[in-house]
Amino acid sequence: MAVLNVNIDHVATVRQARMTDEPDPVWAAAECELAGANGITIHLRQDRRHICDRDVRLLKETVACKLNLEMCMAEPIVKIAEEIKPDQVTLVPEKRAELTTEGGLDCAKYKRRLAEVVKRMHKKGILVSTFIAPDREQIIASAQTGCDAIELHTGMYANASPATLGSAKPADGGQRAINKRLSELECGRDLAMENKLVVHAGHGLTYRNIAGVARIKDLCEFNIGHSIIARAVFVGIRQATAEMIKLIDKYRIDDFRLSNADCQLKLQIANRKSKIEN
Ligand code: PXP
């Protein structure tokens, strides 16, 4: 099973451009699942600029694979997660004026609030991941607060890729900068795994730059949105999803270890459920 969660926020962005009822993210999610997606990711922002409460409720009922809710730690949003109970929440920072999530969550600074949110999510059987830079302090804070997973921010890697460098491209095509970002992600993965965290990755990943991160061992899930939805405009979301899965599979070199990470996650879910039942 390919480990792709498709972020369908931008299906809702198109709908909200006219404040109408199409395209429906629920239809999009079904198409992604039919293409073999491992999960569906949505971000319920405080300003409801794309995904709205109705989408979260309906997707919880209709998504058969994993439903991953991206959210900030503001109390009204935390309450919605407690009520709807997605399979997983990915905690992100949120600024009203940003175009998309900028930077990772400062888990060290907000450690007390993070620990409280983790506890509340676990009480409802929801896995918790934090969206963070591959930074020692943030990884340790995620582990210490009881998170199940981290999502490593791949934005810096994506920004180092030739496609985004344009005329500023150095003679080596940016390869040194790309390698530096990849090795930061690998170090982050190592520290996270030493601390018993499952490792996800996402942000800014495209059909052109996925190879570099897909080759990193033990990354368990990729959360990809904009690039897939952009391609879907031309080829349809089912095909766009299938093409990304095919690329991830092509470059992935650690089926065995990856399935270990998957098992680890399943074990965590089972442990969590038995804790709740007792
Ligand atoms: N992961 C997180 C935490 C995000 O906030 C986003 C953007 O919503 C993504 C992944 C997907 O990023 P992109 O749309 O650039 O693929």
Image (tube, rainbow, N blue to C red):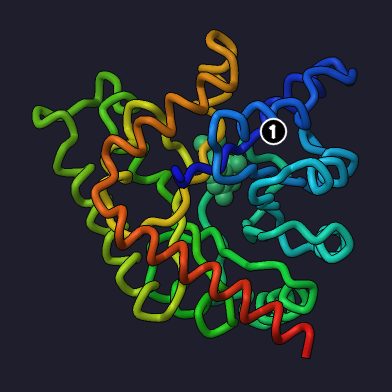
Relative side of 232 to 11, left or right: left
Q: Position of residue 50 (x, y in %)?
A: 77, 33
Please give the name of the residue rendered at 83% of the width and 18% of the height, measured from the top-left corner: 22
Where is residue 123? Give x, y as percent: 78, 79
Q: Quadrant of ligand 1?
A: top right
Residue depicted at x 26% and y 39%: 251
The residue at 66%/33% (across/down) is 8
Where on the picture, by quarter, is residue 209? top left
| 111, 195: nearer the viewer | 195
Instruction: Report which residue position mark 1 lands on.
Output: 29
- The spot of residue 57 in percent (x, y) is 87, 46
**Left or right: where does residue 124 sit relative to residue 137?**
right
Task: Say what amino acid the circle numbered 1 marks.
Answer: Ala
Residue 197 position, x and y percent, is 46, 73
Above or below: residue 229 compared with residue 142: above
Up the image or down, 97 lies above or below 148; here it is: above
Q: Secondary structure at mark 1?
A: helix
- Crowding at dot 1, Cα within 10 Å, few <14 / some 14-19 / many 20+, comes out as many
